[in-house]
Image (cartoon, rainbow, N blue to C red):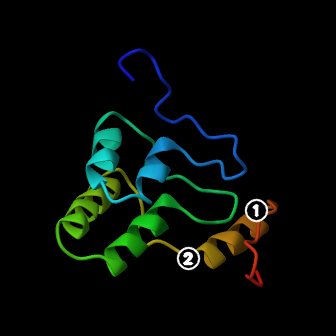
Amino acid sequence: MERGADINYRLNDGKDSSPFDSSATGTKPEIAIYLLEQGAEPNILLPTGVTTAWRIHNRLSNRSGPVHEGFAQVRDMMIERGVEFPPPSPVEVREQMRAEGLTPVVPFGHER
């Protein structure tokens, strides 16, 4: 980023994720914290209806210890930046996307 990299770059890999969104799937919340401190967009919506807030919500539901504490800090930073917690589920987000005329990508094995 010091050399001009786009902190909100979206991957063209079919997932449309960003560095911040990818950091929410790992085990090093300090990366997500750093990206937020540098101005990363906290409210990422993927074509599947998954949001970064949903990823963080799940991390907090499934972890304990230092990783949990780190992702709790990420959640708090996201709330400070206007992100809703608890977040709507991907199913709810896909329904909202349809109501807005968008066509969400329904993951394999999901009905809607």
Q: Amino acid at mark 1?
A: Glu
Give the camera-side residue of 40 and 109.
Answer: 109
Q: Residues within 10 Å of mark 1 (few under 14, many from 20)?
A: few
Residue at the image position 64 percent from the left and 66 percent from the top: 49
Which dot marks residue 5? none
Q: Is residue 51 left or right of residue 70?
A: right
Whole-percent x, y for residue 111 in the image: 77, 84
Q: Is residue 49 left or right of residue 40?
A: right
Looking at the image, is mark 2 or mark 1 nearer the viewer? 2
Give the vertical position of 38 relative to 79 (above or below). above
Q: Can you say which quadrant of the picture contains the N terminus?
A: top left
Q: Amino acid at mark 2?
A: Ser
Residue at the image position 52 percent from the left and 74 percent from the top: 88
Which dot marks residue 89? 2
Q: Is residue 67 left or right of residue 38?
A: left
Residue occupying the far front of the picture: 27
Residue occupying the far top of the picture: 3
Whole-percent x, y for residue 78 in the image: 34, 55
| Residue that carries the numbered disc 1 in the rendered image | 100
Residue 86 in sight from this viewpoint? no
Give the camera-side residue of 27 and 44.
Answer: 27
Whole-percent x, y for residue 82 in the image: 38, 55
